[in-house]
Image (cartoon, grey):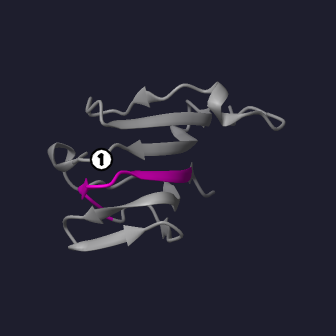
Amino acid sequence: MAKPEYEFFPVTAVDYTICPGGDPKITERILSADPEAKVATRILRYEPGADSTPMGVQKHDFWEEVYIMEGSFTDLSLGQTFTAGMYACRPPGMPHGPWRTDEGVLTFEVRYRSK
């Protein structure tokens, strides 16, 4: 299976849902997903004061590209803050996080597998 085909639609038609981990301050809007491959395109939102420390450092078995659209958050392992307009491309296995934000952050993410 692959991600479904969609023509343009308003992303506001997709509700935010709480991300795995269960923190109501960390939500996602899944725009497109391939459940078999366990990859997706999403908008991730951390509300002000959100902290993913309970989820620990993250490592995925897929590629992840992230663009920060609004706000900022801090990678607590690196001690670095990343802000709107910044971009990351993470290969499978690259550690990142946990994250904390005072002002909130909104990111656009694409997750995929290479052949």
In-front residue for pair 49/37:
49
The image quadrant of residue 73 is: bottom left
Q: Is residue 100 left or right of residue 42?
A: left
Q: Position of residue 15 (x, y in %)?
A: 54, 25
Q: Position of residue 11 (x, y in %)?
A: 66, 35
Q: Position of residue 59 (x, y in %)?
A: 32, 55
Residue at label 1? 48
Marks counted in the figure total 1
In-front residue for pair 76/62:
76
In-front residue for pair 54/82:
82
* Residue pictured at 27% horizontal, 64% vertical: 74
Q: Position of residue 29 (x, y in %)?
A: 53, 34
Check residue 96 for magenta coloring: yes
Label 1 Cα crowd, 10 Å radius (few <14 / some 14-19 / many 20+): some
Question: Which contiguous range is marked in magenta?
Answer: 95-110
* Residue pictured at 60% horizontal, 58% vertical: 114
In terms of secondary structure, where does tag 1 sit? Answer: loop
Q: Is residue 61 visible?
A: no
Q: Is residue 56 left or right of residue 34?
A: left
Q: Is residue 16 above or below residue 107?
A: above
